Image (tube, rainbow, N blue to C red):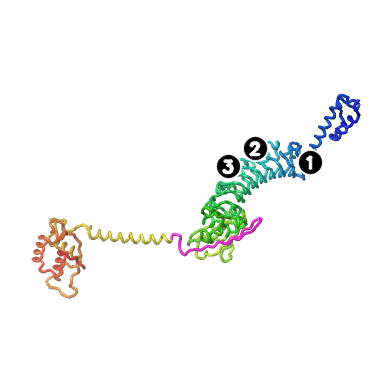
Amino acid sequence: MQPKCCIWKTRILYQKIHPTSSTMLAPDMVDGQLSGSHCAIAGVSIKGLFALLVLTLLLPPGAMTSSKPVTCHKTCLCASNIVSCSKMNLTGIPMALPHYTAVLDLSFNQISKLKAEWTPVKLSKLHSLLLSHNGLTFLSSEAFLYVTWLRYLDLSSNGLKILEEFIFEPLEHLEVLLLYNNHISQIDRTAFSGLNSLQKLYLSQNQVKRFPLELVKERNRLEKLTLLDVSTNRVKLLPIQELQVLPAWIKNGLYFHNNPLPCSCELYSMLARWHLQELSSATDFRDDHTCLLPGTQKEKVLTLELNKVHLNCSAVTIIGEEAYLEQVINLGCDTRQRDMLKSWVLPGNVQVSSGNQSARVLSDGSLQIGPLTLEDSGVYTCYAVGDSLNETLYVTVEVHNTTQAGGHEGMKTAYTTLVGCLASAVMVLIYLYLTPCRCFCCSGQGLDKRALGDSLHSSTVSVSPTHEDTGPEGGGGGGAFDKPPFNRHVAFPDPKGLIEQNGRLSPCGEEEEEWREEDRGKQGQRRKSDAESLSSVCSDTPIVV
């Protein structure tokens, strides 16, 4: 017979390991004793049980319960609707979470993958999920299908490298997303699509090389996004032109310091303007805004000091609005916070009222003034009231004493004068050279030679009288009042049969001499001026009248 101590040691050890269980002996045990053939086997089993007991005591309390239902005060800590499983060395997310869970803290564990089946049921009341400091390297594309009401998601300080397309699309109510201190180097352009409620996105301390302009650019941006942190990454190029036209409430929360940006006057000008506007992204991290100087050494300098020593960039000052008479302009109240209550005060501390016809506040808070007069010049003040801060902005307007098209009107006047001069010259030429012939062109049709001669002389000598009036009938006439008036005629001689003189047509031909003899026989003598005029026409000397 074996010693009884073997039997009782087995019973005592079984009760220590399973204190809640009743003592269930093996079939070989009769009346609390082991049969003789199994006592040696029982000794071996005792050693295995001791080893299992030691292993159970050494393991952390959560290692054996990673896939078991949540047990408050053992696996996690529960405080009302908050379930905290932080620092429990969990390798997986506990199953069967309470349906009333609103905040789930799983930070500082060893959860490397967030699979699609981490919660088999919808947690409609869960609004905050904390998974930081877990060494998380994998996110399933279906990981957030059952937690669509999340508003706060913390994935910071993990090992994420890639954000795939539409990874966060189910989280349409998400407001804050923390992704800083990971190893993210690739971000799909659609990774943040569907986050229509997102307000703050933290991407700092990663390996991002491209600035995610699609998040803030007009027409594509997330409408409620007020903070985008891409500081301490590997961004080497900023879309400066696109960033400059953004509203102030976006620029106020746009952080890009501690990136290897190349130094340029464009970068300095943009940052200097933000600093003058007292935007938080520029003023809070003034000494962290650095850039790399051109050259092989790539010296790092402060961006806001480029105008002093390094690149000699021009100093930046904020210039007010310039306008012209009769113009209508809009003055924007570009505040650092969105959706603020805005009011305006005109120059001379005059409040804008509904009865003011020349100034009114638009629905977006801007002030429309016009048609402008010289009295509208001055400083306009915008008072903005928000939930967390108040702002006062001043806009200086200078109205020039001319219309907007005043410079062009002078050019128009010059062109009009020039055209008028050209038109006058053309009319003079037409009058002198293109007047229809009424004299010798109709030869043989009732015109006598006297008339033809008169026409010839009067056309060549325009101011000399062709005849001397002999006075009244029967008398020689006399007196100052008997002097006949000058007769002016314009006609052109027929070029046929004219003698060419010095390359020009001369009107002094034989036919002219015959007309002159006939006139002398009929009229008598001509005035001396006619002979002089005729001789002057037949000469090469120009006539000056």
Q: Quadrant of the N terminus?
A: top right
**First-in-chain label (2 vs 3):** 2
Q: Residue at x 15, y 74 (%)?
A: 478
Q: Are marks 2 and 3 in contact (CB under 8 Å)?
A: no
Q: Residue at x 88, y 26 (%)?
A: 34
Q: Amino acid at mark 2?
A: Glu
**First-in-chain label (3 vs 1):** 1
Q: Which residue is mark 2?
A: 142
- Residue 290 spot, x, y in % from top left: 57, 55
Q: For residue 499, say whether it is visible.
A: yes
- Secondary-structure class at tag 3: loop
Instruction: Judge whether 471 appears above or below 8 on screen.
Output: below
Q: For residue 254, say whether it is visible.
A: no
Main SS of the magenta segment?
strand
Decide whether residue 387 is among the magenta residues. yes
**First-in-chain label (1 vs 2):** 1
- Residue 322 spot, x, y in % from top left: 50, 61
Write down the region rendered in magenta: 381-405
- What mark, if any, has residue 74 been given in the picture? 1
Please tell me in which quadrant of the rendered image residue 137 appears: top right
- Residue 299 spot, x, y in % from top left: 55, 55
Q: Amino acid at mark 1?
A: Lys
Callout in the foreground (1, 2): 1
Q: Residue at x 53, y 50 (%)?
A: 239
Q: Which residue is mark 3?
A: 188
Residue nearest the viewer, comparing 24 with 212: 24
Instruction: Judge whether 160 appears above or below 2 on screen.
Output: below
In this view, the residue farthest toward the bottom is 479
- What mark, if any, has residue 63 been given in the picture? none
Count of numbered tags: 3
Decide whether residue 133 is among the magenta residues. no
